[in-house]
Amino acid sequence: MQCYTPFVKKKMNRSPLQQHFLNKLHLLWPALKGSLAQVRKPCIRPNCRACARGHMHPNYLLAFTQKGRRRCLYVPQAMVPALKRALENGRRLEKLLYEMGPALLREYREHHPAQTGPAVKTKRKTPAKS
Ligand SMILES: [Zn+2]
C-alpha cells in the first residue's frame, strides 16, 4: 500500500501524481514565458549596402514582464531556436500546471473517499438580483 504524502518533503515516497509531474517537468527544460519578435534595425557601419537599401538587419527581441513591467532584451541569432523551444515548453508547462488542480483533488479523493464527493453540495443558491 502506498502512503499519500503530497505535502511532506520526502524523496522516497512520491505519489504517482508527483512522479508524473516531475517526469514531465524534466522534459520541459528550457522553459520561459514571454514573446519573441523579429525587428529590423540599422547597423553602425558607414556606407552599409543593406541599410542604404532600407533592408537593414534582422534582430530578435525577447519581450517579458519583470516585476510588473514590460521589458525587452536582444537575442543572439544562435539562441533563437532554443528560445522558441523554451517558449513552447513554457506553454506546455502552464497547461501542466492548470491540470494539477483537478489532478490533486482527484488524487486526494481517491484516498479520502468518505470526506468529500457526492455528499458535499457544490451548487450554491444564487441570491436574487436587486
Ligand atoms: Zn547595415
Image (spheres, grey):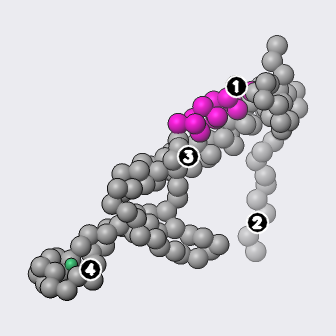
Q: CA distance from mark 4 to mark 1?
A: 54 Å
Q: CA distance from mark 1 to mark 3?
A: 18 Å
**In the image, what residue occupies the spot 23% across and 82% down?**
45
Where does label 2 land, which residue? 128
Where does label 1 land, which residue? 16
Q: Quadrant of ligand 1?
A: bottom left
Judged by depth in the image, the label closer to the viewer, 4 or 2, is 4
Image quadrant containing the N terminus: top right
Where does label 3 land, which residue? 93
The magenta segment is: 15-27
Q: Position of residue 93 (x, y in %)?
A: 56, 46
The circle on residue 97 is: none
Residue nearest the observer in this picture, 114 or 79:
79
Judged by depth in the image, the label closer to the viewer, 3 or 2, is 3
Number of numbered labels in the structure image: 4
**In the image, what residue occupies the spot 35% across and 67% down?**
60
Residue nearest the observer in this picture, 38 or 109:
38
Where does label 4 land, which residue? 43
- Label 4 or label 1, whichever comes before in sequence order: 1
Crowding at mark 1 (Cα within 10 Å: few <14, some 14-19, many 20+) = few
Helix, strand or loop status at disc 3: helix
Determine whether the beta carbon of the residue marked 4 sits less than 8 angstroms from the nearest atom of ligand 1: yes
Q: Amino acid at mark 2?
A: Ala
